[in-house]
Image (cartoon, rainbow, N blue to C red):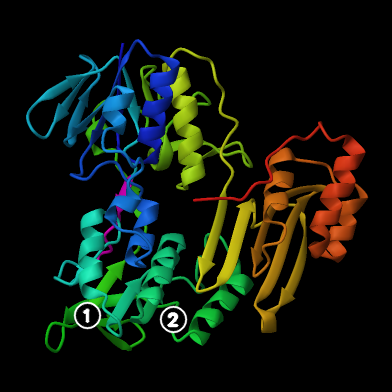
Amino acid sequence: MHHVIIGAGPAGVIAAETLRKADGASRVTIVGDEPEPPYSRMAIPYLLADDIDEAGTYLRKQDSHYEDCGINVVRDRVKRVDRATKTLVLAGDRTLSYDRLLVASGSHPAVPPVPGIDLPGVHACWTMEDARHILRLAQKGAPVLLIGAGFIGCIILEALVRRGVSLSVVEMENRMVSRMLDETAGGHLGRWCRSKGIAVHTSARVEAIERGSGSNLVARLDSGVTVEAALVIRATGVAPNVDFLEGTGVEIGNGVRVDRHLRSTDSDIYAAGDVAEGRDFSTGGYSVHAIQPTAADHARVAALNMAGRNVVHQGSVNMNVLDTVGLVSCSFGLWMGVDGGTSAVLDAPDRYRYVNLQFEDDVLVGASTLGHTESVGILRGLIQSRLRLGKWADRLREDPTRIGEAYVARRQTVGANAYAFSLGPVTH
């Protein structure tokens, strides 16, 4: 049996290691299209902040790790998958056969249709090569423009601030991180960033990027404002890497559509991580949750099923934790609420503190917070356990900060072993 994995990120590496343990007699090959050893994109901001060097982004620290584990790493790009012959056609005009295939190819940055977006000095922040360009241009005091203030954009923002650049941010939505915070909380986050000297332009679009004075660029906004920058970083969303599946008949939605075994519509092709559109724990529908915990869960479940086990994935929980210049924001589950549901809100704008709990009957189904980190693990656990809160739901509607008391009281009521879920820290 030959297991082949397309993608050398966290999902690909975890899947490969899981396969070696679960199916030791089979061959395992990872195909990655970048020259570096398998690394984590989520570590790039730490590289930009000078917390680590390039080697610090590598997923495994020993040079011989993959060889020692019996994992073959091929550096090449997959051009096409031939389902009929179970063969990958690679860019180097070679082929690679498989018995079972895992698509863990991740995603790539979307390019907005802006004139000048391809000028020198405009970069994504996605690959190690991108990071090298940013490190060269993002010198202390240099004017830098960041296009996009979503989750990825705000992670990049944190690293840029730590580099000491003069930062401007343009976001087309009316608030920052609109996919994890409502208008109130997102507004507070924008005020917080402005208080730290960041020029934040919300409800704004870049209409064009032009050459300015010297080597600088000038971005023209639809508001009439112009922003000069030595470096422009685009963080305007991503799209799944699925081009090589064109013509295969494998079902593609927002990613590769997979069942609860992480299997595609081809029984020998699986998918995991950012490229997989799997079951959403909260809605029961299909979603892409592009976060590292989901990638790791997908990888383990997919690998075990590829090895012949019967492991069911329970669905991914929408969750995000973000530190933006010292202000931590979080969202879990159906943070925007459900039809017919109720909510509890605490808002202290002068202290940049916000808590929003969303209920369906007496069950906590979603939550978002700003500047409130005390009960993050409990919020996640209550949502994943679907614990009925009883009278504590009413108490939380009156005071949402009592979430810790509610957990302890209900856990004692239902028994210590009835809801065994992890309350450890959430990592990305």
Q: Viewer-nearest of labels 2 and 1?
A: 1
Residue 113 location, quadrant:
bottom left
Q: Amino acid at mark 2?
A: Val
Q: Position of residue 30 (x, y in %)?
A: 27, 30
Residue 200's tag is: 2
Whether residue 420 appears in this view of the structure is: yes
CA gap between label 2 and label 1 equals: 17 Å
Q: Compared to 66, does 22 lie above or below?
A: above
Residue count near mark 1 (Cα–Cα under 10 Å), binned few <14, some 14–19, many ≥20: many
Part of the protein shown in magenta: 107-113
Q: Position of residue 281 (x, y in %)?
A: 61, 38
Q: Position of residue 181 (x, y in %)?
A: 58, 64
- The residue that appears at 32% across and 82% down in the rendered structure is 221
Residue 291 in magenta stretch: no
- The residue that appears at 90% across and 41% down in the rendered structure is 412
The local secondary structure at tag 1 comes to: loop
For label 1, the residue is 230
- The residue that appears at 16% across and 86% down in the rendered structure is 212
269 vs 165, nearest the viewer? 165
The local secondary structure at tag 2 comes to: strand
- The residue that appears at 51% across and 35% down in the rendered structure is 297
